[in-house]
Amino acid sequence: NETVSKNFIEQEIDKDLAEGVYDHVCTRFPPEPNGYLHIGHAKSILLNYGLAQEYNGTFHMRFDDTNPTKEKVEFVESIKEDIQWLGADWKDHLYFASDYFDQMYEYAVKLIKKGKAYVCDLSPEEIREYRGTLTEPGKDSPYRNRSVEENLELFQNMKDGKYKDGEKVLRAKIDMASPNINMRDPIIYRVARMSHHNTGDKWCVYPMYDFAHPLEDAIEGITHSICTLEFEDHRPLYDWVVKECEFVQPPRQIEFSKLYLTNVVTGKRYIKKLVEDGIVDGWDDPRLVSIAALRRRGFTPESIKMFIDMCGVSKSQSSVDYAMLEYCIREDLKMKKPRMMAVLDPIKLVIDNYPEGEVEYLDVANNLENEELGSRKVPFCRELYIEREDFMEEPPKKYFRLFPGNEVRLMHAYFVKCESFVKDEDGNVTEIHCTYDPETKCGSGFTGRKVKGTIHWVPAPYAVKAEVRLYENLVDEEKGVYNKEDGSLNLNPDSLKILKDCYVEPSFGDAKAYDSFQFVRNGYFCIDAKDSAPDALVFNRIVSLKSSFRL
Ligand code: ATP
Ligand code: MG
Ligand code: MG
């Protein structure tokens, strides 16, 4: 086992266990079902799940569905799918915060009875005004000293639907002079006539996030409630809620910094607009970084885990380069995937001295670095396709591929020498003619002479036509993600290139959605789950082989 130094959260947990604050670890991932999960959420999921595993603890999956305005059942399903795909197994610990509405209401009543909460009639604007500023203390609401009896009755009336939305709220009675504005009598319940996806029209009062979240954690017996940095200032309120509600073993909130990626669109608002404007093909468009998009593009759970591990956990804000994610998927696929030949921009090559109608089946190793992947048979014959860029009529210096008079190796096959070529009336090369030397067959041990270039090919009569989609960053890296003037996105017009006339080897026969391959020299590719069909394959390029990223 490697000795990896522990991150600051692990150190805190170790301390809590050593001091007997807790004798076990229970974590949770609490998404709001109001959108699709993205790479940032993956960090939180893998962190919480990883900690539970590391400490032999329990991991809870909880939908934080206390705000009925934005939530949808559709999102619940996509979130579950994404988390399962990432491998975070919640076993039988699946929860919905809305299942605790009755208990939350009772805790609010308990606070009223303790004189720790009151019903307030101030309007939202007045509440804001009374709250004060960073430099000025707030002032007490005129309703702050209502009696317990009056508060109980008014809160009951709130629940019974006797007031309009926003007419009355329940506030925690803490300290209007606190330097922390979150502690200046925060609202904990509001009146809102909204249908909830789980509880329907049962409730017309709903708890606020800062009240609901600590209760959810405490009710479930969460020990370490891990959240992102923007909640640091809310921690005193979190602690106040669990203390005043008298939980025997209150959970502890620990904050870490969010994951940000450079030159990548993560804002939900922007993604929504890209989808609505038809600029991307839905929330799972392979150029996005939602989990579903990464999956469709061909990323693996292992590569995402490696990436998240490399990012580390800390309290300092920084953003990570997308190239690091690309590095991780290359590393993951390198040994696992067969290396196939695919020609993305085909031009015909004819071997004039190869007998017409003849075919031989070459035995080709699937991955030279991993014997376990076995081998396959690739037909070789007189007419092939090669990449257009592998031939030049007038080559520059150091061009070692095909040009008139030059000899190269056809990968896994023979040496061929370019004898002539054919042009159409516009001057485009349409066909290259070669001769081959039967002595030079790959694996024959031929040492008579050497060539400097090796090019890949597919056998023309046997090759399978396929569509290949090449991606670039959705935003213009030079200009930055957002336009400084109007906040719009600086889109890269070349983010998607569709190549319709590619040819792949015949051995993709039973390839199915999400299967991935290396195409030699061109990168890693994945069968598109939405648009590919067995007789009309569509591949997404996951990543090219070259990397600008260095460890
Ligand atoms: P977004 O606005 O991007 O949807 P969110 O915080 O509103 O983010 P939630 O559904 O509330 O989304 O998030 C569930 C959990 O995921 C929270 O604990 C949140 O802190 C965490 N999370 C969200 N974004 C990131 C991120 N970029 N990096 C790490 N954790 C994140
Ligand atoms: Mg969210
Ligand atoms: Mg949120």
Image: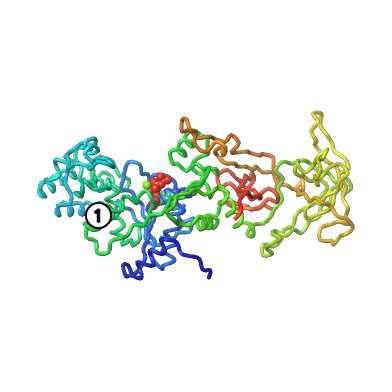
Is residue 268 found left or right of 1 in the rendered image? left
Q: Quadrant of the C terminus?
A: bottom right
Q: Residue furthest front?
A: 135
Q: Position of residue 79 (x, y in %)?
A: 43, 50
Residue 163: quarter of image: top left
Type of residue at label 1? Val
Q: Residue at x 78, y 57 (%)?
A: 362
Coloration of the structure image: rainbow
Q: Measuring 42% from the left and 52% from the top, which residue is drawn there?
A: 257
Asked if residue 75 can be seen in this view, the reply is no
The local secondary structure at tag 1 comes to: helix
Side of 418 relative to 215 (left or right): right
Residue 258 in view of the camera: yes
- Identify which residue is drawn at 20% across, 42% down: 169
For this rendering, which residue is in front, 486 or 510?
Answer: 486
Classify residue 160 as left or right of residue 91: left
Q: Residues within 10 Å of mark 1 (few under 14, many from 20)?
A: many
| Above or below, comparing residue 51 to residue 498 in the picture | below
Q: Nearer the viewer, residue 142 or 391?
A: 142
Q: Position of residue 426 (x, y in %)?
A: 79, 29
Residue ID for mark 1: 241
User: Residue 545, position in %: x, y?
Assistant: 66, 50
Total labels: the figure holds: 1
Residue extending farthest to the top is 425
Percent coordinates x, y for residue 38 in the rendering: 47, 48
